[in-house]
Amino acid sequence: MNAVADLIPHSGSMVLLERIIDYDDQSLIAEVVVRGDGLLGGDEKSVPAWVGIEYMAQAIAAFAGVTAKQANEPIRLGFLLGTRRYGSNIAAFKAGSILTIRVKKIMQDDNLGVFDCRIDGDGVEITAKLNVYQPSLNNTRVNYE
């Protein structure tokens, strides 16, 4: 399986997913080891649970990346439009904990998508629906003139 950094438009320390566990044409399962580096808030002991939205968004980006690779297309930039029904049974993730991120496509057209997302771990249950946007290949050019 491809490395996560080969599937998403992130680099360096912004690649938060540890690995892809499984995927199919409708869903993807990834793993995160919660880092206590303070990059997205928190400290060496914990990370705020709202960072789970970024974990979910990166899993969706990995799903799009796998899909692009299978179609022999480039990895494209995408945007998180919004989150609905974010429910968490915790306030923070414990640094070092291992989380499983599941994303399942509910609806997707050429540019917009809605995904049902879930994060599970030891004592962790988080769910949300994420709305995402990915510009078309012909709409991704930027003219700086």
Image (tube, helix red, strand yellow):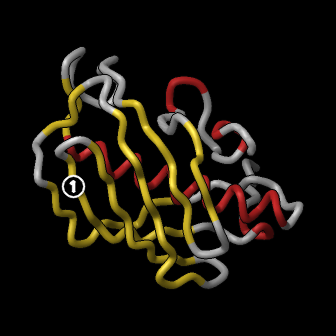
Q: Quadrant of residue 123?
A: top left
Residue 90: % across, % down: 11, 46
Residue 26: % across, % down: 59, 75
- Horizontal side of residue 106 vs 25, given as left or right: left
Q: Which residue lies furthest to the right in this view?
A: 72
Residue 82: % across, % down: 34, 67
> Residue at 80% across / 70% down in the picture?
138
Front one among 95 and 136: 95
Count of marks, rendered view = 1
Front one among 53 and 141: 53
Residue 69: % across, % down: 81, 57
Front one among 42 and 46: 46
Front one among 144 and 86: 86
Looking at the image, residue 81 lies above or below residue 111: above
Q: Name the residue under label 1.
A: 125
Looking at the image, residue 84 lies above or below residue 8: below
- Horizontal side of residue 5 vs 124, given as left or right: right
Quadrant of the snapshot with the N terminus? top right
> Residue at 21% across / 48% down in the picture?
124
- Horizontal side of residue 107 vs 41, given as left or right: right
> Is disc 1 placed on a helix, strand or loop?
strand
> Residue at 36% across / 35% down in the picture?
98
Amino acid type at image mark 1: Glu
Mark 1 crowdedness (10 Å alpha carbons): few <14, some 14-19, many ≥20: some
